[in-house]
């Protein structure tokens, strides 16, 4: 006799986790809309003939202290500097997930980790097979492996789909794990030279950063200059500078001590996330997404093996990888889907995860560094693949939108108006007493209105009797 299923996949979140996810996704959604606007602006700017040269001039404008090895173009400052802020927030998110979120429980962590790994391996395999068949370059295998959570949420905001919190949390956790492996890919595969002196200095700076945190030292005037020094040393070491942001994010304490409303990591994330989502990532998009778009360029996306591999990796690889990894994990861990959800919902989320933008553009620049033509073609492929994935996800999610609205309404219902959704108070006797008082007041009001109506008509109301021509539990004809 088979063992009973004991775990629920995409079940109800705990109230603290639900509140955290809601706050995080609110900021990411706004950031995603700004990201979308920035990408559209970049495309318009780079494709109007009279303005194209100005876009190139701005993107390639150099400034910075050359003596420190930091005389960089504006585009490089965005990719190496501003994205360090993005990866700093990603590091905090990962740390929080490991100590207080879904990833702290190994049994619960298996699902998003396997789904994310399969969602990165499958696109890489699709890219490799496409280029093996077409004789293309394998250098861009990592380009379609990343999911852009901000862009995905922007799509949800635009199409007006109200996903239940469990589906949104699954998407967010997928993106966090996805970011972790993207960071590892950048650190391992895109470091071709090492300056051991600078790298040692960066590690020494990180050690000082860790000691200051453990001693409880506070003050932005201490940490911001130190962070800039660590970043500069990491950049000059040959390791991608964004790794410094991740390392510092992982060092922050994300569990709460007694009496704390928020941990230091949560406070820092609350402060820095708007800067990341609202400024750093949109500026990176503005300076990186400006590629020439024409009929011939779009045709090249589907004929060159490198660009076709990116498109198929995002649209097909991501969807098949995440859905397949999720189904296999649920199947072999004997879990079951939460009531009200179906596998079609998981497939739609997997399709939505095919929207790759920020990290995909970054990896594309690193993979084809020195070949600006192919770099721009790969960027066009990332935009094209993300657009196709967004359209497919929109169609799939719209089919179930009515069901999502009903589930969200159940999650948000707060009839006793105490600020806590009723679904989280079903086992609390005090909640039921409050609801009884509410219903008694409503019943008293209905009795009063019935008495007034009877007095006006001169007919005494008999409690429990039906109106003439009707019987109990029968609708009026």
Image (tube, rainbow, N blue to C red):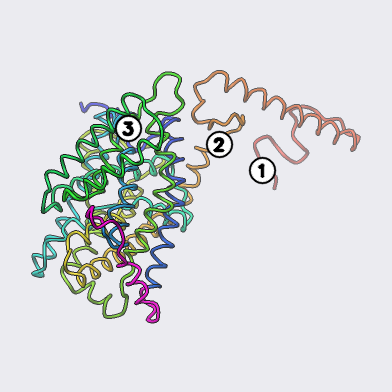
Query: Is residue 240 found left or right of 388 in the rendered image?
Result: left
Q: Main secondary structure of the magenta part?
A: helix
Q: Which mark is residue 252?
A: 3
Query: Which percent across, then down, holds residue 351?
Result: 31, 55
Task: Identify the mark nearer the N-term, 3 or 2.
Answer: 3
Residue in view at x 38 percent, y 58 percent = 283
Task: Identify the mark nearer the N-term, 1 or 2.
Answer: 2
Query: Which percent across, then down, holds residue 84?
Result: 30, 48
Q: CA distance from mark 3 to mark 1?
A: 62 Å
Q: Secondary structure at mark 1?
A: loop
Residue where numbered disc 2 is placed: 413
Q: CA distance from mark 3 to mark 2?
A: 35 Å
Q: CA distance from mark 1 to mark 2?
A: 28 Å
Residue where numbered disc 1 is placed: 475
Query: Is residue 128 found left or right of 76 in the rendered image?
Result: left
Query: Which percent across, then down, holds residue 121?
Result: 17, 50
Query: Is residue 255 found left or right of 261 in the rendered image?
Result: left
Front of the two marks 3 and 1: 3
Q: Is residue 414 above or below residue 400?
A: above
The magenta stretch is 46-70
Dividing the picture into quarters, in which one does residue 41 lie? bottom left
In this view of the protein, which residue sits in the foreground, 204 or 385?
A: 204
Query: Is the residue marked by circle 3 packed among few (<14), some (14-19), or many (20+) residues within 10 Å?
Result: many
Query: Which percent across, then down, holds residue 291?
Result: 31, 71
Q: Which mark is residue 241?
A: none
Residue in view at x 53 percent, y 38 percent = 412
């Amino acid at each position: 006799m088979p063992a009973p299923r004991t775990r629920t996949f995409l079940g109800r979140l705990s109230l603290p986790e639900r509140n955290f996810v809601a706050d995080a996704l609110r900021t990411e959604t706004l950031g995603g809309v700004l990201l979308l606007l920035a990408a559209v602006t970049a495309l318009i700017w780079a494709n109007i003939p009279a303005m194209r040269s100005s876009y190139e001039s701005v993107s390639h404008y150099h400034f910075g202290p050359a003596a420190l090895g930091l005389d960089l173009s504006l585009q490089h400052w965005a990719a190496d500097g501003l994205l360090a802020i993005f990866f700093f927030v990603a590091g905090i998110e990962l740390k929080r997930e490991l100590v207080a979120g879904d990833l702290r429980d190994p049994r619960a962590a298996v699902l998003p980790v396997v789904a994310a790994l399969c969602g990165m391996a499958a696109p890489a395999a699709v890219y490799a097979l496409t280029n093996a068949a077409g004789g293309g370059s394998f250098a861009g295998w990592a380009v379609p492996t990343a999911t852009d959570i901000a862009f995905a949420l922007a799509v949800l905001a635009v199409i007006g789909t109200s996903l239940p919190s469990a589906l949104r949390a699954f998407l967010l956790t997928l993106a966090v794990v996805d970011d972790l492996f993207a960071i590892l890919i950048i650190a391992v595969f895109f470091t071709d030279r090492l300056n051991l002196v600078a790298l040692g200095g960066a590690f020494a700076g990180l050690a000082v950063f860790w000691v200051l945190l453990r001693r409880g030292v506070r003050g932005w005037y201490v940490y911001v200059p130190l962070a800039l020094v660590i970043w500069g040393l990491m950049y000059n070491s040959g390791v991608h500078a964004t790794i410094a942001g991740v390392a510092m994010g992982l060092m922050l304490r994300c569990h709460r001590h007694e009496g704390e409303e928020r941990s230091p990591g949560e406070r820092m994330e609350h402060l820095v996330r708007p800067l990341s989502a609202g400024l750093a990532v949109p500026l990176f998009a503005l300076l990186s997404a400006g590629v020439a778009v024409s009929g011939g360029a779009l045709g090249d996306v589907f004929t060159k093996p490198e660009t076709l591999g990116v498109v198929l990796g995002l649209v097909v690889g991501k969807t098949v990888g995440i859905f397949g990894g999720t189904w296999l994990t649920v199947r072999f861990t004997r879990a079951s889907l939460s009531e009200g959800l179906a596998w079609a919902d998981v497939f739609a989320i997997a399709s939505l995860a095919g929207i790759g933008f920020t990290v995909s553009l970054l990896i594309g620049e690193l993979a084809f560094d020195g070949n600006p033509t192919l770099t721009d073609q790969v960027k066009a492929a990332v935009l094209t693949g993300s657009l196709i994935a967004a359209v497919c996800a929109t169609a799939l999610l719209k089919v179930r939108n009515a069901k999502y609205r009903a589930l969200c309404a159940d999650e948000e219902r707060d009839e006793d108006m105490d600020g806590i959704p009723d679904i989280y108070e079903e086992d609390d006797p005090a909640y039921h007493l409050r609801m009884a008082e509410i219903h008694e007041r409503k019943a008293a009001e209905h009795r009063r209105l019935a008495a007034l109506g009877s007095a006006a008509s001169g007919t005494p109301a008999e409690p429990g009797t039906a109106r003439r021509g009707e019987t109990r539990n029968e609708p009026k004809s």
